[in-house]
C-alpha cells in the first residue's frame, strides 16, 4: 500500500508539521468543481493516452479494472486552504498505464469530461506518485468527487487531481491547463506554497 505524506498522527504540534503553510485542516470532504458535474456511465467511460506523435491507446472501464489496483492513503491540500489528512483511495498507478506507451514526452495535460485540463511534468505523474483513482473510502468514487475515475496527485495542490478524467495528452513541451492559464501556479507544490503564478 502506498502511504503518501504520512506525517505524525496525534496532537497539535505534530499535526501542524504535517500541514503545509497557510492550510487548515478539515474533516469533511468539500466539493470544488468549475463546471456542472458530468454524469458518465461506466460502460461509456473511456480513458485515452495520446502520445506526442498522435498515437493513441485507450482503456474502457473493464480494461482499467483489469490493471493492478493499489490502495493509497494520502493527505490532500486544496489551494483554497483546506487540507484533509489520511484520505483512502484505490486505483491504478499512472505508471501502469504508461508502461504500455512509447513516448519521449516530458509533460502531460490531463483532460476531463466537461473540458477541464491541468498540466504536469511527467516526472510528477511517474514513480508511484499519481493514480487513476476509482474508489474512495471503501466505496465507488461518486460523481461529485470525480467518478467514475479521477486523477490523484496528492503531493501537489488538489486542482492537479483532475476529476472525471478521460485522458492524458503527452507533450514535448509544457502547456498550461485551465487554472494555470487563469493565474494559478504552473507547478503547485503545497509545501512551497506555489498558489499563484508569481509565488
Ligand atoms: N474536472 C475537474 N477536475 C477538478 C476540478 C474541476 O473543477 N473540474 N477542480 C479541482 C480542484 S480546484 C480541486 S480542489 C479538486 C476538488 O476535488 P473534490 O471536489 O473531490 O474535493 O478537484 C480538482 N479537479
Ligand atoms: Mo482547489
Image (cartoon, rainbow, N blue to C red):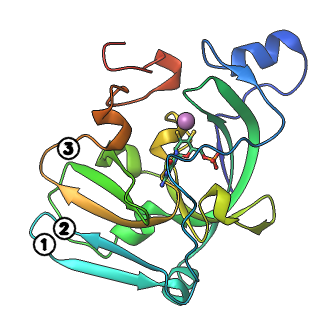
Residue 93: x and y in percent read 50, 62
Distance in Å between CA atoms under marks 2 and 3 = 14 Å
Are the residues flagged by discs 1 and 2 in contact, CB closer than 8 Å? yes
Disc assigned to residue 54: 1
Disc assigned to residue 94: none
In percent of the image, x 61 and y 66: which residue is there?
A: 147
- Residue 71 visible (yes or no): no
Residue 121: x and y in percent read 29, 43
Q: State the residue in front, 33 or 154.
A: 33
* Quarter location, residue 71: bottom right
Secondary structure at badge 3 equals loop
* Lateral position of residue 117 relative to residue 9, left or right: left
Secondary structure at badge 2 equals loop
In percent of the image, x 54 and y 27: which residue is there?
A: 79
Q: Which residue is mark 2?
A: 51
* Lateral position of residue 177 relative to residue 54, left or right: right
* Residue 146 vertical position relative to residue 173 in the rendered view, above or below: below
Quarter of the image where the C terminus is located: top left
Comparing labels 2 and 3, the label whose residue is closer to the camera: 3
Toward the right, the furthest residue is 11
Q: Which residue is mark 3?
A: 175
Toward the front, the furthest residue is 36
Quarter of the image where the N terminus is located: bottom right
User: Mark 1 or mark 3, which has the lower sequence index?
Assistant: 1
* Residue 63 vertical position relative to residue 184 in the rendered view, above or below: below
Amino acid at each position: 500500500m502506498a502511504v503518501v505524506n504520512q506525517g505524525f498522527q496525534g496532537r497539535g504540534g505534530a499535526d501542524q508539521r504535517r500541514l503545509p503553510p497557510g492550510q487548515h485542516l478539515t474533516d469533511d470532504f468539500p466539493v470544488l468543481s468549475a463546471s456542472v458535474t458530468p454524469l458518465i456511465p461506466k460502460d461509456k467511460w473511456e480513458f485515452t493516452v495520446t502520445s506526442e506523435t498522435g498515437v493513441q491507446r485507450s482503456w474502457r472501464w473493464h480494461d482499467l479494472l483489469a490493471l493492478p489496483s493499489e490502495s493509497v492513503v494520502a493527505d490532500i491540500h486544496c489551494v483554497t486552504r483546506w487540507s484533509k489528512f489520511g484520505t483512502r483511495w484505490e486505483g491504478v498507478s499512472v505508471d501502469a498505464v504508461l508502461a504500455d506507451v512509447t513516448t519521449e514526452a516530458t509533460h502531460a495535460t490531463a483532460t476531463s469530461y466537461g473540458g477541464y485540463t491541468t498540466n504536469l511534468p511527467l516526472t510528477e505523474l511517474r514513480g508511484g506518485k499519481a493514480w487513476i483513482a476509482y474508489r474512495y473510502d471503501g466505496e465507488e468514487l461518486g460523481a461529485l468527487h470525480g467518478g467514475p475515475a479521477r486523477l490523484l496527485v496528492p503531493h501537489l495542490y488538489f486542482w492537479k487531481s483532475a476529476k472525471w478524467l478521460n485522458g492524458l495528452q503527452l507533450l514535448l513541451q509544457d502547456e498550461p491547463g485551465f487554472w494555470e492559464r487563469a493565474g494559478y501556479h504552473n507547478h503547485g507544490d503545497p509545501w512551497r506554497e506555489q498558489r499563484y503564478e508569481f509565488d
